[in-house]
Image: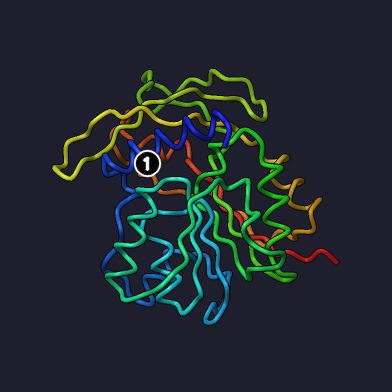
Amino acid sequence: MDDIARHNQQRWEALAQAGIEYSRPILDLTANSARQLVDPYGVMGDVRGKDVLCLASGGGQQSAAFGLLGAHVTVLDFSATQLERDREALTHYGLDARLEQGDMRDLSRFADASFDLIWHAFSISFIPDTSPVFDEVARVLRPGGWYHLAWHNPFVHGLDDREWNGTGYPLKLPYVDGQVQVDPTWDVDGPDGVKRPVEGPHEFRHILSTVINGLIGRGFVLRGLWEDYTGDPTAQPGTWEYYLAVAPLALVLWARYQPE
């Protein structure tokens, strides 16, 4: 693990312990809501009996959802607290999963062609280069397997919801792949409902051409691309809800590994 990964691991530990929403086990899932959580666009099909890797996806959310859908689940995350949240959720539902602590760029503990589906959370933006991840994903996926990837929308990366100037949010950073936004502050809603600032991890912009061409070059066929549009255009300008309506935070894709 390099210095960037160690720094981001420490920051994610702090965020998870502060109760960030991505580290709150979901304990009221049904089969229907579990599928809606991991596949809102209706792409992946039946996963019963399939081997699923939740990549950099700890927190007690996706692991439980896939378990309830009948998959054989493995989780890899570099945050011990995130993995503990998975244990809490799995215990709640009476499910089992393989939980592994490690860097998303190093999947050497897994054999070639180990998984039918890799569900990659909103986390690749915390490493500077997508190449080692895509290499490993292609290696451990079986031919015909699915890859789900969510990442920070590169067209709005670097905007700050707190910088509403009355007409918009100013762009400040060049549109460059790997551009770093050092240590943004995250406002975390604690269990008491009070927002508290927590220093965030290093973030890196991954532009659309880098992601799409990187996957195509490794034998992936794109099956769908969506903006994660969760904002409210009727909200008060300057609020987080309005910001998300102006600048959708994430892009989401599903691709199938077809190396032939």
Q: Is residue 68 above or below residue 98?
A: below
Q: At 41% across and 69% down in the image, what residue appears? A: 65
Q: Nearer the viewer, residue 16 or 205?
A: 16
Side of 23 relative to 229 (left or right): left
Q: At 31% across and 70% down in the image, what residue appears? A: 29
User: Under tag 1, what secondary structure?
Assistant: loop
Number of dots carrying numbers = 1
Q: Quadrant of the C terminus?
A: bottom right
**x and y percent of residue 88 in the render?**
29, 62
Q: Nearer the viewer, residue 203 or 137?
A: 137
**x and y percent of residue 10 in the render?**
41, 34
**x and y percent of residue 17 in the render?**
28, 42
Q: Nearer the viewer, residue 153 or 205?
A: 205
Instruction: Name which quarter of the figure residue 112 lies in.
Output: bottom right
Q: Is residue 53 above or below residue 189?
A: below
Q: Read off the residue under disc 1.
A: 233
Q: Quadrant of the N terminus?
A: top right
